Image (cartoon, coloured by chain):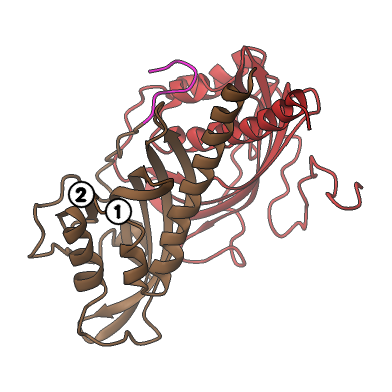
Amino acid sequence: MNLEELEKQVQLQEDIQEIEHLQRTYGYYFDNNMWAEILDLFSDNAESVEIVDHGVFYGKKGVERVYVDMIGGKGRGPSPTWMQFIVMQIGAVIDVSPDGKTAKGRWQTWLCEAKPYGAYPRQEWLHGYYENKYVKEDGRWKFSLLHWNNTFCSPFEDGWMNLPLMGWMPAPDADAPPTAFHPYPSGYHVPYHYKHPITGE
Amino acid sequence: MNLEELEKQVTLQEDIQEIEHLQKLYGYYFDNGMYQEVIDLFSENTESVEITDHGVFRGKEGLIKMYGGMIGMPRPGWMFFEVMQSQGVIEVAPDGKTATGRWYTPSFECRPFGGTKKQTWQFGVYDNEYIKENGKWYFKKLHWNLTYWTSFERGFLKVPRLSDTPFPHADAPATAYHPYPSGYHVPYPFKHPVTGE
């Protein structure tokens, strides 16, 4: 192997590492309602964000609307401290394109949440899958597309079998309705971005 | 450092990365009941597969005996196994041909239980081996040790395991089935990184 080939291989390992960090950093900011920091993790040329059944938000403007205005509740003031969204970013499978400029990643997530339902705080378990896209710009990896597919959102007390979904949450100002929202027990499989490593299928 | 030494170090990092992907892909196929895809992740020279107290299935033939019957079997939407492949510690042998991996697996499940269905929490530890053949990593040995398998409602303290599940067609009985609260520790494939013991 010559130096140039080796450099390419090292580059790939660095890319995977950086993308894994990017995704986990997103999670650690999300935990703490740091929406401005999340916005800065997205490319200015971001394609879209789609989270549960909120719908699709296009472009960097859409990214800002979904995180800062909607989830972050712009103008709503600080969240009470009992409200929490702990999103564990688990099981990264990152595939960088041959030109090293874009990448795709599948993750799964386990969440512990507490949020208001009407007048009452509820504690809940959630599970879901990401199929995300990343882009390298000026030597840095950023999100270009984020899609989080919810498997279940269930009360801590009842569980996914008894209450798979705590409620519908379509966002009225989304650019488009959700493209794939089929929570448990639909049996829906979030499509894989990758081929089988051995059979290539 | 010369080029050859550097190449070795890069290969080690690539190996760890590929093995981590292999294990997570196994999880993502298993989630969706894609058992043919699961079987294809195993080497032709597979040693064995052992899952909880199902027993030991030897060789690629044993593997097919274990998973093969489930290929294409329709599954109701409510039946699911979300197994989170977490915290890989991968150690590649100095010759770069084999490796070991220890993982944690928290999981959510819902499955039939007698005439009814049950939602359950599971937790366990993988102690796996991998082999590199023709430049690709495969599973050589998979061993999943159950810590607990409990009902969602009651928890591991009250119900550490819901039942025993030995498979009558296994090649040998389970070699290590010591669920909570036995205090059993799955042996470590690795040495202590600082003391070397």
Q: What amino acid type is highlighted by mark number 2?
A: Phe
- From mark 1 to mark 2, how far is it between C-alphas? 7 Å
Q: Chain of mark 1?
A: A
Q: Pick whichever, B137 or B189, lies toward us.
A: B137
Density class for disc 2 (Cα within 10 Å; few <14, some 14-19, many ≥20) is many
Residue at left offset 66%, top offset 20%: B132
Q: Pick whichever, B193 or B143, lies toward us.
A: B193
Q: Which mark is residue A65?
A: none
Residue with the mark numbered 1: A150
Residue at left offset 26%, top offset 74%: A72
Residue at left offset 31%, top offset 46%: B78
- Callout 1 touching callout 2 (CB < 8 Å): yes
Residue with the mark numbered 2: A181
Label the red chain with its letter. Answer: B
Label the brown chain with its letter. Answer: A
Quadrant location, the C terminus of chain A: top left
Q: Is residue B77 magenta?
A: no
Please give the range of residues in magenta. A194-201
User: Is the residue B158 above or below the residue A89 in the image?
Assistant: below
Secondary element at tag 1:
strand
